[in-house]
């Protein structure tokens, strides 16, 4: 598998995963013109995407899901309660992601075996929100974001991937002293909000295993975090774990990362 982080942050999140010739878009929260431009930059042509997999209904993850699925004649996978969500309405075909389970994504001809998506529900104020594990040809990727607190069940279900995409939304002190109104600060830091750098470090410690070679920190707040603080927290956790050699990257809002071999 090969991963391309197209963009991640409070303004929109999306990543492209190739499993042989099968192309999977993980979340579609970027504005459609921006998403289309970044797909074009990745040389994804007409009907290049096979599946769009969306973790939850907040617009920074779902904004362009239906439109991009229609343009590419792709199957949209999401929780069934979002089937009538405005952002999903244009998708030509929708299929249900289980709250906690396993589903195969149809592979392109000649690309067998089919990629497998594992799901588990996470605490967030858009219910259901799902963490994902994608498996193909003995390679594993896990995506954990928009989760209000560290959860052992999530870690144990999706632990030891080759590549881990993990939310590092905010630094708690920056959030407390920052410009958000108090109600929004309480939401972000609450048990159904987002992971802080310290909480990310807890999840990283629980999830990194012998196979893990790369961690990508995602969904950083532009106002309440910095790449340097998030990187420091992740690297300190990896050092305590005895895995300082694991590569740590920070996904950016405004430009894609270089492709990552899973």
Image: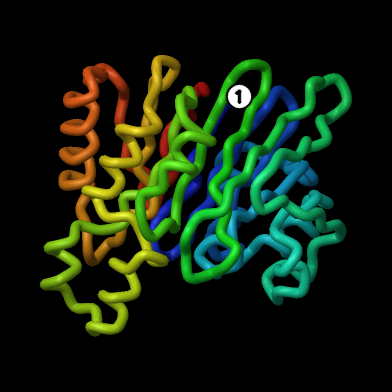
Q: Residue at x 44, y 38 (%)?
A: 155
> How many tags in the picture?
1
Q: Is residue 171 left or right of residue 135?
A: left
Identify the residue at image location x=86%, y=60%.
92
The answer to whether residue 160 is above or below residue 98 is above
Q: Does residue 119 appear left or right of residue 177 in this picture?
A: right
Q: Quadrant of the N terminus?
A: top right
Residue 89 spot, x, y in % from top left? 77, 71
Residue 62, image x, y percentages: 60, 63
Toward the viewer: 93 or 98? 98
Name above or below for residue 229 compared with residue 20.
Answer: below
Compared to residue 179, the image places residue 72 above or below, namely: above
Where disc 1 sits, the SS reads: loop
Q: Residue under circle 1?
A: 1
- Going by the image, does 85 lie left or right of 239? right
Dividing the picture into quadrants, the one containing residue 183 is: bottom left
Residue 196: x and y in percent read 27, 55
Left or right of residue 148: residue 260: right
Q: Which image quadrant for residue 59?
A: bottom right
């Amino acid at each position: 598998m090969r991963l391309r982080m197209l963009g991640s942050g409070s303004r929109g999140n999306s990543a492209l995963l190739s499993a042989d010739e099968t192309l999977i878009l993980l979340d579609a929260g970027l504005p459609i013109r921006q998403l289309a431009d970044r797909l074009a930059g990745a040389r994804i042509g007409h009907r290049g995407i096979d599946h769009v997999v969306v973790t939850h209904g907040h617009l920074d993850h779902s904004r362009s899901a239906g439109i991009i699925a229609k343009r590419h004649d792709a199957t949209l996978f999401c929780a069934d309660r979002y089937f009538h969500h405005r952002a999903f309405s244009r998708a030509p075909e929708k299929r249900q992601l289980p709250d906690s389970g396993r589903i195969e994504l149809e592979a392109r001809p000649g690309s067998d075996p089919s990629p497998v998506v594992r799901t588990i529900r996470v605490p967030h104020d858009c219910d259901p929100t799902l963490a994902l594990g994608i498996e193909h040809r003995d390679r594993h990727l896990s995506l954990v974001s928009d989760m209000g607190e560290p959860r052992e069940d999530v870690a144990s279900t999706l632990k030891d991937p080759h590549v881990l995409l993990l939310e590092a939304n905010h630094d708690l002190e920056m959030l407390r002293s920052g410009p958000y109104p108090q109600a929004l600060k309480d939401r972000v830091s609450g048990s159904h909000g987002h992971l802080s750098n310290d909480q990310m470090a807890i999840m990283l410690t629980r999830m990194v295993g012998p196979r893990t070679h790369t961690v990508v920190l995602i969904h950083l707040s532009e106002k309440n975090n910095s790449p340097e603080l998030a990187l420091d927290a992740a690297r300190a956790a990896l050092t305590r774990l005895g895995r300082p050699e694991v590569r740590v990257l920070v996904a950016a809002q405004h430009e894609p990362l270089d492709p990552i071999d899973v």
